[in-house]
Image: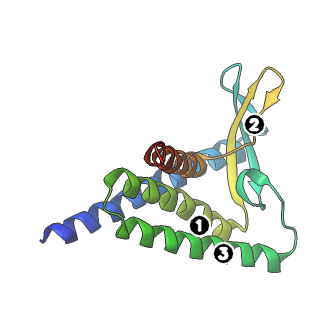
Amino acid sequence: MSNNIKKNYFYFVYIFLIFTADRVSKIFILNIFESSELTNIKITSFLNLSLVWNNGIAFGLLPLEENFYYNILTLIIFLVVILIIFLAYKTSNSIEKLSYLMIAGGASGNIFDRLYYSSVIDFIDITINNFHWFIFNVADIFITFGIVVLLLREFKNNKYE
């Protein structure tokens, strides 16, 4: 097997593992909430598990009630993921490549939800004092981390210009 094929295989496995971690976490949460009458599970003083069906954009922003707009948004997200995979393939920097692949893996998990459930499963709920963050999922963690790494690299690369 050539070195290029091995690398591409690794990248596919990387995306697949992120997708799988997201799916397993969501199936676990669905099983917990479907088998009980709980609506909220307190884990710590700041971390709760709360099942939310998100039909909006990232973190539940701009919920879309109409199927046409929801489907257009899903198609746009799918096209952006294809673009991100292309950017990952084209870049030679490994940190940048892995960041793009994290975004693609997380976005793939959320696209699956959009297609299968017509909504994204969110369940990680963080509240510190009076500050309540948006409810999110494992896919969102990978997407956010990938974006933050890309932004930090960009700031670092443009520091002296």
Label 2 sits on what residue type? Trp
Where the N terminus falls, by quadrant?
bottom left
In the displayed structure, 141 sits above or below 60; it is above
Q: For numbered disc 3, what is the local secondary structure?
A: helix
Residue 76: image x %, image y %? 66, 75
Q: Earlier in the sequence, mark 3 or mark 1?
A: 3
Q: Is residue 96 toward the left or the right of residue 125 in the image?
A: left
The Cα–Cα distance between marks 2 and 1, rounded to whole angstroms, is: 24 Å
Instruction: Quote the CA–CA distance across marks 2 and 3.
Output: 26 Å
The residue at the point 20 percent across, 70 percent down is 4
Where is residue 38 shown, x and y percent of the image?
A: 77, 37
The disc, 2 or 3, on the residue closer to the chain's N-terminal end is 3
Q: Amino acid at mark 3?
A: Ile
Quarter of image, res 124: top right
First-in-chain label (2 vs 1)? 1
Q: Which residue is mark 3?
A: 76
- The three-letter amino acid code for the residue at tag 1 is Phe
Q: Secondary structure at mark 1?
A: helix
Residue at horizontal 67%, vertical 67%?
114
Is there CB contact under 8 Å for labels 3 and 1? Answer: no
Looking at the image, residue 129 sits to the left or right of residue 90; the answer is right
Residue drawn 68% across the image and 54% down it: 121
Where residue 104 sits in the image (x, y, percent)? 49, 62
Residue on which the image places disc 2: 133
Q: Label 2: how many residues lie within 10 Å, few (<14), some (14-19) or many (20+)?
A: few
Q: Nearer the viewer, mark 2 or mark 1?
A: 2
State the image coordinates of residue 52 (x, y, percent, origin top left): 76, 49
Q: Is residue 86 left or right of residue 40?
A: left
Residue at label 1? 112
For label 3, count other residues whose C-alpha is less than 10 Å away and answer few (under 14), some (14-19) or many (20+). Answer: few
